[in-house]
Structures are given as C-alpha cells and as structure tokens.
Amino acid sequence: MALCGDGSPITMNIEIEHQQLLDRLEQTRYFTRDGPGAVTEIPDRLRQSAVSGLGEDMAKILKQTPSLLFELGQIRGGDERTSETVVHLRLRLGGSELSLLPFELALSPQAFPGEGLEFCLQSTLPVVPTREIRRSRPLPVSWNQPEFRVLMITAAPGTTVPEREHAGELRKAVEPWVEWPERMPADAEPRAVEEARLGHVKQRLRILRDASIEDIKRECGRERYSHIHILAHGDYRPLSDENRFGLALCDPSDRQKMQVVSGDQLAKALLTESADGNWRSQPVVVSLATCDSGNGGSVLVRGGSVAHDLHVEGIPWVFASQFPLTFGGSVRLVEELYPRLLRGDDPRLALFETRRRLYVSARNDHDWASLVAYAAVPDDFDSQVDLFFENQSRRAVEVGLQGVDRTLSGRAAVDESHVERLEDRVRRYLDLWRHRMRVGREFADRQRRAECLGIHGSAFKRFGLLLKQRARATSATTAEDARKKAEWERRGDEALEEAWSYYRDARAERATRSSTHHWTLTQYLSLSAVLQKGRDPMGLDEAVALARAEADNPDRSERAWAFGTLAELKFISLYHDSGVGEVAGVAREVAKHCREIVKLAGRASFHVESTRRQFRRYRDYWQDPRWDTVVLAALRGLRG
C-alpha cells in the first residue's frame, strides 16, 4: 500500500521476487564472495547493467503512485521556486524488506520531471529522497545547536582507510569557526600560529583513532558532540545462519583484530549517558563512510541496516552507504557534505548537491546512488535551519574579523594576502547570509533582516577601524610605506562607507519592537555623525526613546546596556541636535549615564569595557577637538 499527499491509498505491486532483488543488489557490488575466503570481481559491464536495471525497476514502483505525480506537478507549476528549491520526498517505509529497495537509483518515470534521467539528479525539479521510520511524536532534538562539535571515529583493524584525507577535509570544514590565539605576535610564523590554535581546533574537532565500541561509548560519555563521522569498513555479521552487515571496529584486546558490531550496539554507544549522569549524548548527525552501512541484508532476522538501527534509536539524521563505497567517493562525500552542514545549509539541499558532486566526479563507480539518508524532520524544521545558518554565519564573521584584528594590530609587517583571504571569507559569509534573507513584510521577517544587515554594518565598521588603525601605525618614511599607508586609509574609508549603508538599510526595516533596531539605529546615527552624512534629529529622538524604555528593564545587564546607549546618543547629539546646548552640559549627562553602567554591572564588567572602547574610538579614530571634553567625561564616569 502506498500513500502520498492528500491522495487515497493505492495498492501497489513490486514485481521482483525477494531472492531476485538480493541477486541484483549483489551484482551492484564491485566484488562478491563465492565462499569463505573466495572473492570474485564483478565485471564493470555486468555491474553497470545491474545499476541500470534496478533504476528502471524503481521507476516502475514510483509510477504506480499517481498522487506522487500530481504532487510533483503542483510544485512544478508554482511560481515560487528559487535556485535553492528542492522537493523533499520523505519515504516512510514499513517493513525492513522495503528498505532494501534502492529508490535512490530510480530513473524518472514517464511524465515525471526529467523523464528518463536519474530521478535524484535531474534539475528540472530537484528531488531529494530521505528515509524514515514512523514515529508517534517527533524526536526532541533541535537542528539549531548552540555550539557544534565534530567527532571523527576511525577503525581499520588489519587494513587501511583514507584517514588522513577525511581528517584533512573535516579540518578544512571547521576552519571558519576555529578562533585565533590571543596575545601572540602578529608576525609569528604560520606553523607557530597553527600550533597555538590547536586547542581551539580541538574545541571543534576531535579524532578517535583505532576505535573499539567501548572507546566510542567512553568518548561520547565524556564530551557532547553534535556531528559524528565514522570511517571504517563494513563486514558481514552472522546472525541465526543469516548474514547481516555491521561495522568493523577494533577489538579492545587487540587493535589489529576485528570486532563487527551491529547498529543496535553502535547506537547504544553513541547515545550513552554521561559519566556524571547529568546528560545523555545526542548527536544530530551521524555520517557513516562505511560500505553497506545502509544495506539491510537478509530480512529473515530482526532489525535493519546499521543506518536504519541508528535512526530507530533516535538519531535524527544518518548519512550512510547502501552499497560498497569507494575510497575516493568517501573523501569527496566528506569534502562536499560537511562544509555545507556546518555552514548551516539545509541538509536536504546539502544531500542533493553532494549526490550530484559524486555523480559528476564518478570514476567508473556509482557512489552517488550509494548515498542514503535517514531523516526525522519536525514541523518547524525550516525555521530551525534558518536559525542555525544565521548563528553559524555570525560566528564565522566574528572569527574572521578576529583573525584580521590579530594580523593588522601592532607594528609588525603585515601579510597582505592573509588579510585578503580573511576579508574574502568574511565577505562570502555575509553575501550568502544577505542572499538568503527572508523577503516577507511580517515583523519577524523584518526583524531578521535588520539583524542580518546590522551584522553587515558591524563587520564592515570593525574592518574599517582596523584598516585605519593600520594606516596610523604605518610610517611614511619611504615612498612604498607612504603608498601602503594611503592604501590602508582608503580601504578603511570604503569599509566605513559600506558599514553606514548597511546600518541605513537596517534602520529602514523599522522593526521598532526589536532590540536589533535599537542598536542598528544607534550605530547608523553614530556613523552618520562621524562621516558627516547629515543630521537626523528624528532618528535621534526615536533611538533615545527606545533606550529609555530599555533602561526600565528588570534585567540589570539590559539596563546597563541601555545606559551605555544613552551615553553614546547624548554624545552624538552634539552633531544631530542643533539645540542640545553647551558641550559642558552634554559632558555632565554623559558622565552620569556612564556612572549608572558601573553601578549596575560593575567596574570590571564587559559593559564598562565595551562602552570605554567605543568612546576611545571617537577620540582615537576620529580626532575632533570639539568632542574631547565629552569623551574625557565619559572615561572618568566609567571609572566610577
């Protein structure tokens, strides 16, 4: 029985005998076992014929569901598609024998989008199939993880796996979020910098080598991991005179010996309780670079594939291989999939693009069809994906600017290519974020756009200040030095102009109930004053009203921030409000607001340090003697 969308259930026939299906699946392998220790290579022609034949068989199965064609037609006829639209085909399979069917191999049936092409690869209407089991309630796991951590597990008892290549790709994938060491000379050797960053790398990526099932349980009970990548071989696991596929890990008593574990065993180790009993390990993603990890094998014994069992036990997203996976394909899988997952892309789009990448780079293999995904998708999944993407973008921008700050600070020679690479990374994340902004006019949409544009302004402002700081630190004793000094100054001015434009656009969203509007409006007014963009007394009044409302917030921290904003707004009223009065009166009121910050948050608080830094910028970067009196009053007030 098949059910799709609002259509009625239909009775369908799968005209393949079970043993015939197993034989065809065996022919898709690169090697087959004729008996104990006897391995025979399957000719390419026979293997490719089996792949093609199974694709046609899967097309016949899909074609038996008219409501599927109707639903696809409805989507295809809509006018809201974008370049990032994919159709998520959720295969809820009842019975382990149905999970043996390689739907990912299907050719597109007659009258379906991309007729005659591979159903999962055609771009007429991109379709992404995932598998799942039926549950009475969604899994209580959020895709939007506050902090991500990746654990790579490897095991190759008596053989080899491409460990170095996988580790290298994962290291590159986490790079945008690996922080830079503090208090390290800007001219330090790259090798010394990388060694100093090693501790930060381990906060994002850990590698567990030559792992046994006990090692995995112990590590997952010691640290929380959001993403777990397992690189190991698959092997047969005899069960009641039938063969099932399992994961070949190391025997704890002899690391060169193999211990084949089931999906059930692996799930119990991955979802273990912490040593202190206060939490339980709950990865959001588990990827298995393991041959046959998505292969259910015989249906005469209970259970399914390793991937199926992990999903049953409560892991929301499991990426696996239903056929043997080539070494090269496994590396390309990690290279394409993990940067997208960690960047915050929708995992369904990441799955589609990874599959296409495997197809394009295929070297006489069918790794693209081997890739399967088990997925649990709650009703608010789109919102969770958006939030995770925005948080990851914000973090990546902050780390990139941290690297620029470290490179440009001080008086040592600057590796300009390094600065350009970091700037390019920051710009790429900002451009992608801006490209994916919601376009609706609802308050929540405007609020998120204001947040995005405000972060753009904040990033370019910070970058501009760093460039101007570098210009001041560069002497002009030679013609080349003078050229560099002028170049830093010019680029700094351009960045500040960009910052002002983004703050202006954020202000235009007018999400007036949002704290985002509060700070973006203040920054817009600040840069307008500094860059002489014209007075905005109405904007000043609006910002003051918002800050005063926040000054009544019951939270002491929020009140402290509000007084910091009031101090800054009073200061820049010297520019925006022609009737503000004498400088001395402004200075007294600014100092009063600053003393309130100290009273609420403490002299050593970040609130005080942040406000002090902001007023020093007015003094150091934009040297205007008219403002000196107020800046000095603010700094005295922050001393309490």
Image (spheres, rainbow, N blue to C red):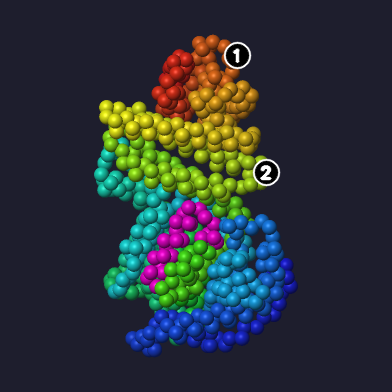
Question: Is residue 355 depicted above or below 505 in this figure?
Answer: below
Q: Callout 1: helix, strand or loop?
A: loop
Viewer-proximal residue among 486 and 579: 486
**Does the segment drawn in magenta span residue 337?**
yes
Which label is found at residue 236? none
Question: Is residue 445 depicted above or below 346 in this figure?
Answer: above
From the top left corner, tell me how far across and down residue 369 is, in percent.
Answer: 50, 73
Q: Is residue 275 visible?
A: no
In this picture, which residue range is highlighted in magenta?
325-351
Is residue 430 found left or right of 507 in the rendered image? left
Which label is found at residue 441? 2
Distance between mark 2 and mark 1 Cα atoms: 36 Å
Residue at the (47%, 32%) spot, across then down:
496
Crowd tier of the residue under label 2, counting other residues whose Cα lies within 10 Å: few below 14, some 14–19, many 20 or above:
few
Q: Marks 1 and 2: in contact by CB < 8 Å? A: no
From the top left corner, tell me how far across and down residue 581 is, in percent.
Answer: 57, 11
| Main secondary structure type of the part rendered in magenta | helix
Residue at the (46%, 75%) spot, across then down:
366
Residue at the (54%, 10%) spot, across then down:
582
From the top left corner, tell me how far across and down residue 85 is, in percent.
Answer: 60, 59
Viewer-proximal residue among 236 and 241: 236
- Callout 1, which amino acid? Gly
Residue at the (32%, 66%) spot, across then down:
210
From the top left corner, tell me how far across and down residue 139 is, in percent.
Answer: 57, 60
Viewer-proximal residue among 310 and 494: 494
Is residue 88 found left or right of 268 in the rendered image? right
Residue 209 placement: quadrant: bottom left
Question: Is residue 444 depicted above or below 298 in this figure?
Answer: above
What is the tally of numbered marks visible in this picture? 2
Question: Is residue 198 depicted above or below 475 in this figure?
Answer: below
Q: Callout 2: helix, strand or loop?
A: loop
Location of mark 1 (residue): 579
